[in-house]
Amino acid sequence: MLLKMLAFFAATSWVGWLLLIMSLQTKRETRQRSETENTRATGTIVDYARGERRNGRRGVHVYWKPVVEFTADGRKYRAEYPNQMDRERFPAGTEVDVLYCVSDPLRFHLAQDPVFVDSGRSAMRFSLILIATCAALTLLLAVLVGGLRLDFTGLWYRVQRLFHSR
C-alpha cells in the first residue's frame, strides 16, 4: 500500500515537472516573439476562419481563428491569426493592438491574446504547486506510515558551529 502511494506521488510529481518544462518553453518562445514582433499598430478583427480537428471517438472539435486587418508601413495587411480566440469576447469589428515584425508584417501577435498575455505563467504556477504538494505528501506519508525519522540534530550542530566559530 505504502509503495503504491509513493509511486503515485512520484508519478504525479513527474507530471508536474513535465508541465514546468513545457511552461518554461512557452515563456521562452513568447519572449522571443515579443523581441521580434515589437512594432505596434491598431488592427480590426474583420472575420473568423473556421477550423476543425478530429477528437477520435468524440467527433470533431470546431475552433475559430480571427482574421485581422491592420496597416503597417503604409500597406494594408489582412491575415489569419495563428491562435484561436473566443468569438464572443472578441467579436468581428473589435479593434485590437497588433504587434508585428518590421521585416515581415505577417508575423504578428495580438496584445490582447490571452495565450500570449499569460505566456505559460498559469501552467508554471500549477506545476510548482503540484510538485510541492507531491513532495510534502510523500514526506508526510514516509514519516507517518514508513517510520522515517527526521533527525536534524547533526545539521543543527554544524550550523551552530559555523555561526559561533566567528
Image: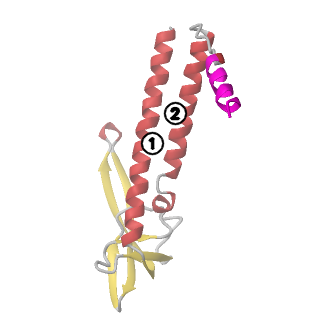
Q: Earlier in the sequence, mark 2 or mark 1?
A: 1
The residue sitting at 71% across, 30% down in the picture is: 164
Left or right relative to 124: residue 37: left
Give the answer, above or below, for where 137 lies relative to 49.
above
Percent x, y of residue 34? 42, 68
Task: Give the residue number, with chain letter if any, for mark 2.
Answer: 131
Identify the residue at image location x=47%, y=57%: 119
Please give the range of residues in magenta.
154-166
**What x and y, as percent, mark residue 140?**
61, 18
Name the residue at the bottom extreme.
Answer: 74
Left or right of 38, for residue 141 = right
* Amino acid tagged 2: Ile
Considering the image in quadrants, where does the C terminus appear?
Answer: top right
Residue that extends furthest to the front in the rendered view of this protein: 166
Q: Position of residue 43 (x, y in %)?
A: 44, 80
- Whether label 2 touches label 1, CB < 8 Å: yes
